[in-house]
Image (tube, grey):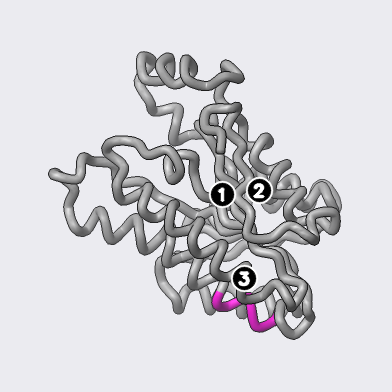
């Protein structure tokens, strides 16, 4: 199951996991875009399920995951990718913008993990991958809500990893740098130029760059990796 699968990183993750042999439940609020992703997956010979899910609402997550379990009986891999931004300086940030970002980016991951874990524990197998961000590690002005939510995801990753490791369930995070998506395309040219100057690789990443990291963490080969944050940022942040 991939949340926020309608575009960008989520779409790339869904396609790459399907290419690796997975049937994929696609979750998002944009069902029309999900339908297009589902067609690509099915054309490649795998099954796809479209789920209208608002991850900020526990009942919406529960309904979506229940549908997957009723049809496919289990969820082996969860990719928590759904996210929103409401950028502003903290002095100007409205409480509703703070709440909206935390509810989607952090609470949404909690809701999804809480729903899939019982099945993973029973089958003694699972892969949970949370998509965080380089700014959660390095900071950035004007994004206090977004950074708080993504830094919270790193903490959530480590806490849950420690809780379920003995059940053969791994919980990891992927921390993308600046990725060429619909979101970053809206940045002014001078801002994009400044970003490129601080990325040693000299380019923005792609959705596939991130998706290949997710695929590895979801694989059997990564079975002894848990509580880890995988940086995929072209050298922008090294730790």
Q: Look at the magenta stretch and give its main secondary structure.
A: helix
**Membership of 117 in magenta stretch:** yes
Residue 206 position (above or below residue 192)? below
Residue reaching furthest to the left: 91
Question: What is the quadrant of residue 92 in the picture?
Answer: top left
- Disc 1: CA contacts within 10 A as few (<14), some (14-19) or many (>=20): many
Q: For the point 34% across and 36% down, which residue is it?
A: 140
Q: What element carries label 3?
A: helix
Tell me if 189 is positioned left or right of 65 in this view: left
Q: For the point 64% across and 40% down, which residue is it?
A: 210
- Disc 3: CA contacts within 10 A as few (<14), some (14-19) or many (>=20): some
Give residue 37's mark: 2
Whether residue 230 can be seen here:
yes
Label count reads: 3
Q: What element carries label 1?
A: loop
Q: What element carries label 2?
A: helix
Give the quadrant of the C terminus.
top right
Mark 1–mark 3 distance (CA, rounded to whole Å)? 31 Å
Look at the image and give the residue range highlighted in magenta. 114-119
Mark 3–mark 2 distance (CA, rounded to whole Å)? 34 Å
Identify the residue position indicated by label 1 in the image. Answer: 6
Q: In front: 37, or 165?
A: 165
x, y (%) of residue 63?
Answer: 54, 78
Give the quadrant of the N terminus.
bottom right
Question: What is the quadrant of residue 54 in the picture?
Answer: bottom left
- Disc 2: CA contacts within 10 A as few (<14), some (14-19) or many (>=20): many
Q: Earlier in the sequence, mark 2 or mark 1?
A: 1
x, y (%) of residue 131?
Answer: 55, 51
Identify the residue position indicated by label 3 in the image. Answer: 162
């Amino acid at each position: 199951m991939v949340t926020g699968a309608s575009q960008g990183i989520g779409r790339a993750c869904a396609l790459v996991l399907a290419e690796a042999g997975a049937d994929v439940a696609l979750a998002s609020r944009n069902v029309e875009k999900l339908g297009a992703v589902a067609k690509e997956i099915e054309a490649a010979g795998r099954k796809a399920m479209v789920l209208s899910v608002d991850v900020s609402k526990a009942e919406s997550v529960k309904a979506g995951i229940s549908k997957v379990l009723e049809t496919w009986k289990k969820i082996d891999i969860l990719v928590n990718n759904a996210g929103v931004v409401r950028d502003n300086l903290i002095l100007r940030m409205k409480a509703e913008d703070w709440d909206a970002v935390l509810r989607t980016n952090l609470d949404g991951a909690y809701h999804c993990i809480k729903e899939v874990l019982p099945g993973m524990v029973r089958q003694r197998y699972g892969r949970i991958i949370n998509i965080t961000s380089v700014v959660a590690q390095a900071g950035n002005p004007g994004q206090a809500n977004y950074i708080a939510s993504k830094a919270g995801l790193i903490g959530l990753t480590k806490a849950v990893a420690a809780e379920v490791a003995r059940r053969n369930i791994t919980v990891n995070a992927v921390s993308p740098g600046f990725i060429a998506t619909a979101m970053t395309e809206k940045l002014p040219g001078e801002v994009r130029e400044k970003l490129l100057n601080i990325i040693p690789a000299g380019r923005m990443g792609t959705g596939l760059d991130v998706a290949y990291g997710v695929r590895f963490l979801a694989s059997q080969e990564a079975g002894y990796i848990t509580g880890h944050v995988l940086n995929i940022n072209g050298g922008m942040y090294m730790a």
